[in-house]
Image: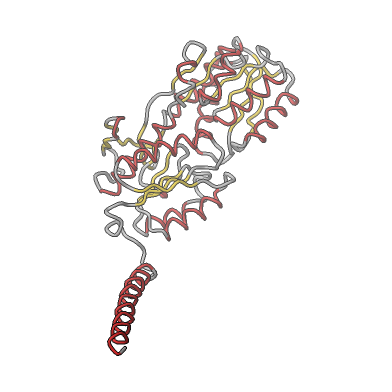
Amino acid sequence: MKKVLITVLSVVMLMAMLAACGSKGSDEGSSSSSTGKESTASDTGGKKKFAIIFKNTGNPYGEKMMEGYKKAIEELGNEVILKAPDQPTAEAQIAMVDELISQKVSAIAIAGNDPDALQPALEKAMSAGIQVLSLDSAVNAQSRKVHVNQADPERIGRTLVQGMVEMIGGSGEIAILSATSQATNQNLWIEWMKKELEDPKYKDVKLVKVAYGDDLRDKSVSETEALLKSYPNLKGIIAPTTVGVAAAGKVLTDKGLKGKVQLTGLGLPSEMAEYIESGVCQWMYLWNPIDVGYLTGYAADALVKGTITGKVGDKVTAGTLGEKEIVQDGDGTQIMLGDPFKFDATNIAEWKSVY
């Protein structure tokens, strides 16, 4: 009996020791994960965090741009954070910048909803050691190291006017359906459209209105309908925004205005194919938004690594896009992706499944 009791006690003691060991291991794990210490690149196997903030959610163009950024950052072996507010406001983006500062990201790429309102938040990020750059819609030069531009703003603006004037036969009333009134890229393109229209050869073409759909589909539809109602002799609409041009295409289709009101702008082939194939939009333009995001990802990585600083003459090796050089952009600098591409009935079928 005594022997049995000793054996039982030995087993109990052994089990208690094993339990204590297991409890000690769990406590250590819990302790190391609850210290409040932010994980660093060395803690996560050398991966750094790269963030991108687009203008707003529900924008197919923005989704493609973020897709390209994600592809580049993951090719480079790092972690990506994709963010966009529900509404295209600077206030919503500022809150996201503050959040990313607290997460200690290495870089923030942003398509600004306002060129100046974002400056304090972005300067705060740069003071925290975060590399800041803009893409698509630039923030001011004091708020970034470099801007990634999809194409030459002058060529975009002039090309859109030239295309529209050709469509309407050289005379008539035209309107512009833009995104937000603070969007720097839209405003610059519109400025060049107006300069192009100053040419005497356009004396019979009248720009009657610049409307703003805020890159929201429902509002862009409403603004298009308002243009048609306010200007019954309207002959053409230029929409330098993917959301706006698709919304205008739908309105013109629903109202049976094919051939009566012409449409061109900057659109996604996948969204504009039905309107180009039906003839509601004879042709439109764009670049590849995936490439814009992809180039931005490589530029962000180069800034973090210190291989570029954002000054004129710096060169970025951007994966499959090859080498791109940084050039002057007003008070700041920019990297130019390339020229806008024309989509029409001859090529839309091959592109509508691409993006």
* Residue 355 appears left or right of 178: left
Relative depth, front residue between 179 and 25:
25
Q: How is the image coloured?
A: secondary structure
Q: Quadrant of residue 39?
A: bottom left
Residue 36 drawn above or below residue 329? below
Q: Quadrant of the N terminus?
A: bottom left
Numbered label tally: 0
Residue 247 drawn above or below residue 143? above
Relative depth, front residue between 242 and 19:
19
Q: Is residue 140 visible?
A: no
Relative depth, front residue between 201 and 336:
336
Q: Position of residue 269 (x, y in %)?
A: 50, 23
Q: Is residue 175 visible?
A: yes
Q: Position of residue 279 (x, y in %)?
A: 60, 12
Residue at the spot 29% in from the left edge and 83% down from the top edge:
7
Residue farthest along the bottom direction in this orientation? 2
* Residue 320 appears left or right of 352: left
Residue at the spot 32% in from the left edge and 82% down from the top edge:
8
Relative depth, front residue between 90 and 120:
90
Residue at the spot 67% in from the left edge and 35% down from the top edge:
218
Q: Position of residue 118 (x, y in %)?
A: 49, 51
Q: Position of residue 290 (x, y in %)?
A: 42, 32
